[in-house]
Image (cartoon, rainbow, N blue to C red):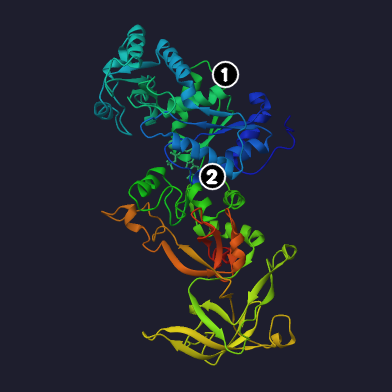
Amino acid sequence: MIDLNNLPKGHFINEAINEDLKQGKNNHKVHTRFPPEPNGYLHIGHAKSICLNFGTAKEYGGLCNLRFDDTNPAKEEEEFILAIQDNVRWLGFDWDDRLFFASDYFEQLYEYACQLIKKGLAYVCDLTQEQMRQMRGTPTEAGQLSPYASRTVEENLRLFAEMRDGKFADGEKVLRARIDMASSNFNMRDPVLYRIQRNEHPRTGNKWCIYPMYDYAHPLSDAIEGITHSICTLEFENHRPLYEWVLNNLDVPCKSRQIEFARLNITYTVMSKRKLRRLVEEGFVAGWDDPRMPTLAGMRRRGYTAPAIRNFCEKIGVAKANSTVEIEMLEYCIREDLNKIAPRKMAVLDPLKVTLINYPAGQTEMLNAENNPEQPEDGSRKLPFSREIYIERTDFMEEPVKGFHRLTVGGEVRLKHAYIIKCEEVIKNADGEVSELLCSCDMSSRSGMEGANRKIKGTIHWVEANSALPAEVRLYDRLFTKENPDEQEEGKDFTDYLNPDSLKVLTDSLVEASCALCTGQSSCQFLRHGYFVTDTDSKANKLIFNRIVSLKDSWGKKQG
Ligand code: ATP
Ligand code: MG
């Protein structure tokens, strides 16, 4: 039982629900639903809606259903139905046995439509789409009533039954609500409730050739399931009068209340399934789970964690006005999560060989390296060290620029967890490129020794040559070069703003030996490079890492 004196506070959705509870509506219950259309994969915007719907139900000790809004078989597929369930579960939410499909209600929805006809509130209309458009009127002028609006109840019932029975061609007739052609709200100017459409439905097959429109099916599905609060995005705000009209004109078990909130948009990406679908179908990305995609499948493969995404959705809050969140904030959230849990490793993405000329040949020692300075209880690991190592090519400069504090000819640098080394000689290949460095090693400077306390400006990472494992590393950048790819210049398409450098594949990288244990989807921090995760393509004999996010945080800093 909900304690009315101690209701959750927060945003306008809480306020609306609290108001209903105080008035004793719905037997003091809160029941929500997440209603995806199975016409694509879920994206991070959907995650916002999932967190809000499941989160609100939980806050009030209520329930949340998962309902597929599968009323348009032209674009809906079983693949999406399965992927969506997988995504919602992965995000950490559970619908128990409340998995529903709007298509389960087709028979009931048909019956309800007959009731509207009997009340004189719906009629079969033969106007073409084009004629209907022309007769709709303008914002300042009323529309014209359809000449078919005067059909009798009997005729309408017979024609509607014939529509269902397949007597007419696709598009030949529709069922329309009889509301108000002079309404200032276009959605109320005798909206279409049913259309004829011969598409095989993923669940009902060819049983139906008429399908209900969203604005008709949604309120009734909500009512049938006993949904008390139907949370949706802002574009449905001026559909609300129609939502209420449907429920008020039928004898339904529950009158759900529709509450709208602003869609989530994020900079440097697109968030509409239609556009994401184009990226997949036109081959701009490798699939719905391409790690550059803002889909949950893509983000998961990229190494985003469910807690980080939930935390992001919590942080951005719920708004009543559309706005765009900076992608840096999402990156901040994943860093925040991984910083606590990701073990530190060393990986050299672009290796340059270093031979330590005074280090005994054939000797290998095991050095101690902490796993995570943020979590001392995570302990340490042993790193092999020997005469031959690899460092990052960019950590050496033959002709150093001002402010370069890493390795230079004659200069010293500290190897993380190991020794201080000095570059004595540069070896080049026939093309004049640096192929190896000969360095001396200060044998008294191992981490923890007295001699390690000398002041050295730079510390670099490395891997030991014999034990290091080859790896492919995939570096991702923003998918688009434009902050808002939805806003296009004259004659351009959003795909014109795709970032040609959004994926860089490095095939010659080397990772420390302990990475062999990175099986399944395990994430780590490669020191100085960022957070990485093993890709689903990764195998024991071919390690592949995705960069989840670099270490540089511009968002957190801005917040002070
Ligand atoms: P898209 O425009 O990306 O195709 P949609 O709204 O058509 O999205 P649905 O499958 O109908 O996709 O969405 C399921 C639920 O998720 C709806 O309640 C919808 O309002 C919500 N939703 C979709 N996109 C966003 C978003 N960007 N931010 C918040 N909620 C969203
Ligand atoms: Mg939709």
Q: Which mark is residue 253?
A: 1
Q: Position of 323 compared to 154: left or right?
A: right
Residue 289 percent location from the top left of the image: 46, 49
Quick check: 24 above or below 343? Answer: above
Question: Which corner quadrant of the image does residue 207 belong to?
Answer: top left
View quadrant of ligand 2: top left
Tell me the SS state at disc 1: loop
Using a 10 Å C-alpha cutoff, classify the residue at mark 1 as few (fewer than 14 neighbours), some (14 to 19) or many (20 or more).
some
Q: Position of 532 compared to 488: left or right?
A: right
Q: Is residue 406 visible from the viewing direction of this image?
A: no
> Mark 2 belongs to which amino acid?
Ala
In percent of the image, x 48 and y 43: which residue is there?
42
Q: Position of 30 compared to 108: left or right?
A: right
Question: Which corner quadrant of the image does residue 455 belong to?
Answer: bottom right
Pointer 2 residue: 47
Quick check: 195 above or below 44? Answer: above
The foreground one among 116 and 448 is: 448
In percent of the image, x 53 and y 37: which residue is there?
85
The foreground one among 400 and 540 is: 540
Q: Is residue 39 visible from the viewing direction of this image?
A: yes
Tell me the SS state at disc 2: helix
In percent of the image, x 58 and y 38: which residue is there?
53
> Mark 1 belongs to which amino acid?
Pro
